[in-house]
Amino acid sequence: MQALLETKESELHELHQSSHHWWTVAGAYEKELRDVYRSKSWRITWPLRKLMKLVSRIFRLPVRLVVGFVRLPKRTARWLLMTSIAFVLQREGLKGRARRWLDRHSTLHAHLRAFGRARGLIRDSEPISLHSSDVGECNNYVVSPLCTAEKTNFQVELMKSAEAWRLAGRIDV
């Protein structure tokens, strides 16, 4: 038992010595760092370091914006796209410019048209001329800002309910 106590005490002594050694090394490094911070060269180069930090942030900003936009949740990106499409479709000048630009990018145009159709922003129809403030014409489809995705979903659910009631023999539709 005495031997075990002596071995543990010697291990403890070695650990204290090791701890003291690393404590003095850390103190020396802290003093060296303090000397660097107090030096004339460190104070003279301060504006250059700040300028370099600013320049690096400016150059990283576009990358951060792109990465941030790519990482947006799908729900937010869809809302932003839906709001943007509705905004453009309600303004004749923007609608014409967007249409001319999208004519050069047919794949994107098809995707945006499908997105707008799925969200109830546009409906496929025959080209007609309407002069109402609620509905605007956009070449081969009619744009209805009042027809939202929620209304379209409600209409689909209503038709399904009516069909279910009809099949159950409760009503004649």
Image (spheres, rainbow, N blue to C red):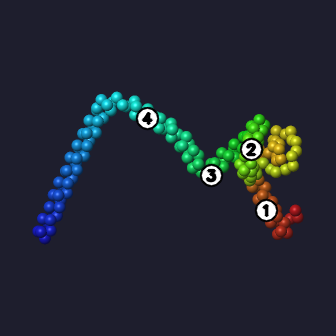
Residue at 55 percent of width and 40 percent of height: 62
Left or right of 83: which side holds 144?
A: right
Tag 4 or tag 3, which sits nearer the N-term?
A: 4
- On residue 104, the disc is 2
Q: Is residue 157 visible?
A: yes
Instruction: In the rendered view, tell whether residue 164 sits above or below residue 118.
Output: below
Foreground mark, 3 or 4, reads 4
Instruction: Kindly identify the amino acid type of the residue bearing the numbered disc 4.
Output: Met
In the rendered image, which quarter contains the C terminus?
bottom right
Q: CA distance from mark 1 to mark 4?
A: 63 Å
Left or right of 29: which side holds 132?
A: right
Crowdedness of circle 1 by 10 Å Cα count: few (<14), some, many (20+)?
few
Can you identify the residue that label 3 sits on? Answer: 74
Tag 4 or tag 2, which sits nearer the N-term?
A: 4
Can you identify the residue that label 4 sits on? Answer: 52
Instruction: In the rendered view, tell whether residue 142 sits above or below residue 166.
Output: above
Instruction: Kindly identify the amino acid type of the residue bearing the numbered disc 1.
Output: Lys
- On residue 160, the disc is 1
Left or right of 42: which side holds 74?
A: right
Q: Position of residue 29 (x, y in %)?
A: 25, 43
Q: Nearer the viewer, residue 100 or 65?
A: 100
Q: Residue furthest left?
A: 2
Foreground mark, 1 or 3, reads 3
Foreground mark, 3 or 2, reads 2
Q: Position of residue 69 (x, y in %)?
A: 59, 46
Residue at 88 percent of width and 64 percent of height: 172
Q: CA distance from mark 3 to mark 2?
A: 26 Å
In the rendered image, which quarter contains the N terminus?
bottom left
